Amino acid sequence: MAHDEFSLIRQWTSRSDGQEKDGLTVGLGDDAAVFSPAPEMEVVACCDAMVETVHFLKETMSPSDIGYKAVTSNVSDVAAMGGYARYALVSIAVAPHWTPEECQGIYDGIYAACEAYNVRVIGGDTVSAPDALHLSVTVLGEVEKGRAIRRSQARPGQVVFVTGHVGSSAAGLHVLLHGDQTTVEPSGRWAKLIEAHQRPRAQVEAGRLLLESGACGALNDVSDGLASELWEIAEASAVSMCVDADKIPVREDVRAYALLSGQDPLKWAFYGGEDYQLVGTLEKSQVEAVRARFAAAGILLTVIGEVEEGKPAQPKLSLRSGDSRTDLPKAGYNHFRQRE
Amino acid sequence: MAHDEFSLIRQWTSRSDGQEKDGLTVGLGDDAAVFSPAPEMEVVACCDAMVETVHFLKETMSPSDIGYKAVTSNVSDVAAMGGYARYALVSIAVAPHWTPEECQGIYDGIYAACEAYNVRVIGGDTVSAPDALHLSVTVLGEVEKGRAIRRSQARPGQVVFVTGHVGSSAAGLHVLLHGDQTTVEPSGRWAKLIEAHQRPRAQVEAGRLLLESGACGALNDVSDGLASELWEIAEASAVSMCVDADKIPVREDVRAYALLSGQDPLKWAFYGGEDYQLVGTLEKSQVEAVRARFAAAGILLTVIGEVEEGKPAQPKLSLRSGDSRTDLPKAGYNHFRQRE
């Protein structure tokens, strides 16, 4: 990339220059950033990459949406530990077919997300790429010392819960890829689904409520679909889990769109991903108390199943539908289709 | 990327599973890692991206070299703050023409570097890419609270120094791209230049000595060539600097190869980059004391010039050669050629 272009990018990123405070000693503009976590807090660190054609298309995501989602997916990982995000490092590799205006749009989305989540960009790298645009974001957050919520603490007798609705992002993508012109209008009937796909929100407040409750066993965020997340918890905790098909919280408009388009909304919920809701386990005795706190905060929390004994080293995930139980595979639309 | 391939990659990265200690509460295998810096230390954070065809070619760097350099460039940024590295998050996007063995090689290089620098991989993301391989590494380190060495603290009267030799990496790249078969043999005459390009070492010990000395004004690492690094210091500190052409530490074999190939070794030193040496300023009264500490540690430290008053808001970088002084531009071989 030519030097002038780098100067341009420095302009885009300079919005958080200066004004170091709240534990940040050195921000942008040096070899590295320097900060201290707040007293009694640990640092939470995670990293997610988004690649053009693999994770997004220009046709389905605006540049600003791409930037917003890249930050969201990382903030969501921090939320899934019960923490909150503080800082971001943004590594972007720009391919020639991206205009400066589009790149500006990506940064607009990044900074919009940073504002929404109270995150500050403290570093990164801007390079050129031969073909596809790559965006890799590292988010650093904080969590109370020794209190991060792990995947491995699901225990038999706990219930399985999920926040908000699932399957909406995958439904939105289906609208964008297969809907007709009128369908995808912002004011259209499926606007909320499209928004769920393009502008998902990380559930930081829900994660904090869960940590504060002290009742949460295991926790994951729904980046790869419910099945994958529940399997990760089952394997890390060496337990089995059973969830009820008719308890999975799917939006009414998702069900309506699925019906119209001949799709299975549960497939979107279990194998779609990018909903960035939190899924995990709760002490049964604490469910009502936690639900009350969530209700007071206006956040939906749904109990969808329970943790079971299961044979050691043979974790299992089952879907209950009426009287029948079927095994839910980790991934793969094909397996799921066989069940249908 | 197919699920099986992800499992494979999980194998590669699983080498640092478990064994959390020394402030690391959660390592690989959860939504995010969790750690605390040592008492009295702050966190240092930086991020560098390397892209195939832009930053490296399969022809000039082995997979293991690529992984090693990606970690080195970040550890070097931490060293340029006077700190040391602790953790790494590795984001890799693998294109179809990279075999599993080559990817394994990249991780081998990453882990070899991590061992050399005492760094632990605590997170990352592995995705597929349509075309070029992308490797983005975030390194988190530590530095004593309030003591990070900034770019902005160069003051008139200080001397300008550099550690080790510069220009070697660019010379090595020239050998690899333009040398004949016998030239590039590992046992050949230019083997050290090739090694300087393929396996550069970050100067962590030098950075620590500089921080401990309390005599260091500004500090940068030589990732983009001396000219660019000195300009960054001059601009951040609002000073001018003058360096002497005949004091720049260039290896004898670099000079010999430059002579044979009709190149200017100073061009490599000023505009080559990737030497990962440290360049900065020192209090004049402390130079001998610092030099003695470096000598005791077996690290070369060379005074190459001095910081000058300069007009505010008009920083300048000059090269002195005999009685003549010429302005050194920030970047651009072309400008440099005009000087020759």
Image (cartoon, coloured by chain):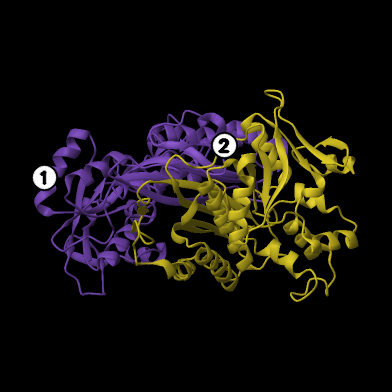
Chain colours: A purple, B yellow
Residue B340, located in which quarter of the rendered image? top right
Q: Is residue B78 above or below residue A62?
A: below
Question: Which residue occupies the foreground of this view, B323 or A164?
Answer: B323
Name the spot of residue B47 as percent of width and height, x first: 54, 49
Q: Residues within 10 Å of mark 2 (few under 14, many from 20)?
A: many
Question: Which residue occupies the foreground of this view, A268 or B210?
Answer: B210
Residue B187, located in which quarter of the rendered image? bottom right
Residue A53 in view, yes or no: no
CB within 8 Å, label 2 to label 1: no
Name the spot of residue A124 as percent of width and height, x first: 54, 44
Q: Gap between marks 2 and 1, in whole Å?
A: 49 Å
Query: Does label 2 or label 1 sit earlier along the sequence?
Result: 2
| Residue A29 - label | 2
Residue plotted at (39% across, 42% down): A36
Name the spot of residue A27 as percent of width and height, x first: 50, 36
Chain ID at mark 2: A
Q: Is residue A155 left or right of residue B335?
A: left
How many numbered marks have been drawn onto this rendered protein structure? 2
Name the kind of residue labelled 1 in the image.
Glu
Q: Is residue B290 above or below residue B3?
A: above
| Residue A288 - label | 1
Q: Is residue A213 above or below residue B293?
A: above
Instruction: Give a yes or no on whether discs 2 and 1 share a subunit.
Output: yes
Name the kind of residue labelled 2 in the image.
Gly
Q: Is residue B118 left or right of residue B176?
A: left
Name the spot of residue A68 as percent of width and height, x first: 47, 38
Question: Which residue occupies the foreground of this view, A212 or A205?
Answer: A212
Determine the secondary structure under disc 2: loop
